[in-house]
Image: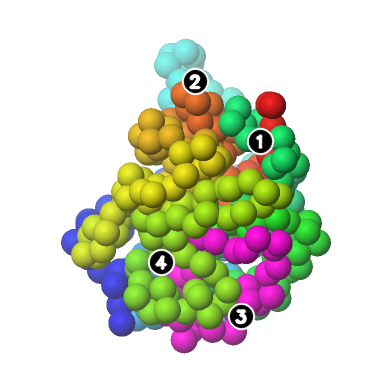
Amino acid sequence: MRLWDTSAHMTTHLLLHWLTGLIFIYVLIRFILPLPVSGTIKLLAAALLLLISQQHALMRYTFGNIASPELPIPVLLVLHWCFVSLIFLCLLLFIRDIFLLLRRLVQGARKLATPPFSPGRRRIITAAITMIPAAYGLRQGLAVPDVRHVETWLTRLPKELDGLTLVQITDLHVSPLSREQRVRAVVEKTNTLNPDLILFTGDIVDGLPERRADAIAPLRDLRARYGVFGCVGNHEYYSDYEAWMRTFPTLGLNMLINDHVVLRIRGRELVVAGVPDRVAERFFQSGPDVAKALAGAPEDAIRILLEHRPGRAPENARAGVDLQLSGHTHCGQVPGINQLVANLNNGFLYGWYQVDKMRLYVSSGANSWNILPVRLGVPSEIARIVLRSAA
């Protein structure tokens, strides 16, 4: 069952294909056509460049969907490496052209210095320069995340709960690029932290349950004193949401859909609530409703809310939430788009925020996005969060 192609996502895909089409045209004009080679070679290079730039369209129509193309891992790695290299090449060419334009404006009609290499060699060097960081970024994007140790003070946290340890896992994105070994490594790292609670904040999977059965099976081995809970991200809706809602409980994941649980810990009550991602309404499911999620929860208990996107934090703070855990942003994954990602998420990108009386933590995520599975200077993480009492 394919749920990816809603009208909203059709628009998103068209924008993606138009953008990659513009990248193709720019690189064709500024890199391929000036090459000192025969017209036949240029034609072949242009055809290859077009296929690389439009690989996501091909994946969508022939191998499943954009988020979960069902191809062998070596093939996916090569395709992604080529695509990321193309993106970096386009950026490098653009920066070079801006520099040359500015230099000509400054120097006027004076003759510019001749570069030390021939045009052909310069283009080979340029291409090589882009392939190296693309390979490194791909490696970092698929690396097993490290543990990030953080703590926060909560004004209403009773002293009995001081030192309570949470482990947040978000944006795991188990996809064709995620082997069972990688998921198992995440599970083992999490279990060594001996957490009180394990909390998932969405985008756990990409693809149908039967396709991801082996890769996601290690989640069944997660251990926490007071349980494993989660909320739903936008990607759960793209690949048979209802089937995943039946699958997660078999893995020991208690999904909170506009609902909460009250836990008795060290003689005090703790509320863990969860709301679905806002994309739910496009799939005829209930959207996020923090009032419904907290309905009937003890007023004097600390309230932890799991919500995939951080943007609704001000509303959640007004509803009486003490701590919100979110993901979704991936902290931008690569430098240069951090501000854009923040703007799309109400100014929230990564780390700790104080929102009225509520604390918000936005994790960079435990994996990368299949469309651009790279990380440069933005490491993935498993967040170990220690709660501290101000009492």
Amino acid marked by disc 3: Ala
Q: Residues within 10 Å of mark 1 (few under 14, many from 20)?
A: some
Classify mark 1: helix, strand or loop.
Answer: loop
Query: CA separation, marks 3 and 2?
Result: 57 Å
Assess whether mark 2 and mark 3 are in contact (beta carbons under 8 angstroms).
no
338 and 212: which is toward the camera: 212
- Above or below: residue 148 compared with residue 317: below
Instruction: Point out the frontmost of discs 2 and 4.
Output: 4
Amino acid marked by disc 2: Arg
In the rendered structure, find residue 345 and report the number of the disc placed on it.
none
Instruction: Point out the frontmost of discs 1 and 2.
Output: 1
Amino acid marked by disc 1: Pro
Q: Is residue 224 magenta?
A: yes
Classify mark 2: helix, strand or loop.
Answer: helix
Left or right for 10, reference 365: left
Left or right for 29, reference 353: left
Residue interval drawn in magenta: 205-230
Q: Residues within 10 Å of mark 4 (few under 14, many from 20)?
A: many
Query: CA separation, marks 4 and 3?
Result: 16 Å
Instruction: Point out the frontmost of discs 4 and 1.
Output: 1
Query: CA separation, marks 2 and 4?
Result: 50 Å
- Above or below: residue 323 compared with residue 354: below
Assess whether mark 1 and mark 4 are in contact (beta carbons under 8 angstroms).
no
In the rendered structure, find residue 158 and report the number of the disc placed on it.
1
Residue 169, quarter of the rendered image:
bottom right
Q: Residues within 10 Å of mark 3 (few under 14, many from 20)?
A: some
Residue 213, quarter of the rendered image:
bottom right
In the rendered structure, find residue 103 and report the number of the disc placed on it.
2
Instruction: Point out the frontmost of discs 3 and 2.
Output: 3
Which residue is tagged 4? Answer: 236
Lower position in the chain sequence, tag 2 or tag 4 = 2
Query: CA separation, marks 3 and 1?
Result: 36 Å
